[in-house]
Amino acid sequence: MAMEPARLRKEFRTLLYATCCDVAKAAYLRVGNAAAEGKLKADTDVEAYLHTAARNLAIDKHRQQKRMRRHTVQMGGDALDVLPVQRTLSAEDREVLEQLVIPQIRGMRDSQRRRVVELQSRWLSDREIALLLGIPVARLHNLRNKAVTHLRGKLAGHIRDEHRKTKKDDGEKDR
């Protein structure tokens, strides 16, 4: 196992050596635990098994880094000038959010749906929320829609008429 971090670093050049060391140690612990629990067959080549386990963990780390790079926006110069101004709430909207919406969110059972709307209420973007939760953006949209439908039902008496969803009589969808 002493040589494993160097092998991993040679194969996965984007991983830091320290990350490769961590991956090798994690593989060693996993295989050791599996052996202690009797999950390995008696004729298992432990050295090859350790190498495969370390390589699989390194692949996972490599893919995780690729996903993070894909969602990272690098800006230089005056690029920060083009970012949208963060929305500010009026005193009335902030009061409604703090007194009605946030307690309803906290009252939801603990689930990804709840975490999605909690993070959204903190003005995080869809990409940021998806990365934090480790889910695809499409799944995020599905969870948010279900959560909003739930909250809409709970807060129906507080929704202004112009913001209330109504079903059309002629069978058309509301969108």
Image (cartoon, rainbow, N blue to C red):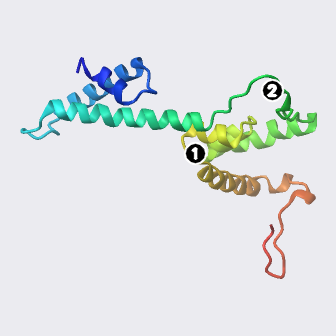
Foreground residue, 134 or 110? 134
Q: Amino acid at mark 2?
A: Leu
Measured along the vertical axis of the image, is residue 68 above or below residue 173? above
Q: Secondary structure at mark 1?
A: helix
Residue 5 lies in quadrant: top left
Residue 160 can be seen in this image: yes
Percent across and percent down for residue 84 are: 84, 35
Foreground residue, 12 or 138? 12
Tell me if mark 2 has few (under 14), some (14-19) or many (20+) residues whose alpha carbon lies within 10 angstroms of its own.
Answer: few
* Tag of residue 6: none
Foreground residue, 37 or 56? 56
Q: Quadrant of the N terminus?
A: top left
Q: Secondary structure at mark 2?
A: helix
Q: Quadrant of the C terminus?
A: bottom right
* Residue located 77% across and 43% down the image: 101
Residue designated by label 2: 80
Residue 36 can be seen in this image: no
**In 3D space, how far apart are the residues under numbered discs 1 and 2 (Cα atoms)?**
31 Å
Residue sitting at the far bottom: 170
Query: In the visual, does 149 lie left or right of 169?
Result: left
Residue 160 lies in quadrant: bottom right
Measured along the vertical axis of the image, is residue 61 above or below residue 152? above
Percent across and percent down for residue 24 are: 31, 24
Measured along the vertical axis of the image, is residue 159 above or below residue 48? below
The answer to which of marks 1 and 2 sits earlier in the sequence is 2
Residue designated by label 1: 112
Q: Amino acid at mark 1?
A: Gln
The answer to whether the residue labelled 1 contacts the one labelled 2, judged by CB atoms less than 8 Å apart, is: no
* Residue located 86% across and 60% down the image: 164
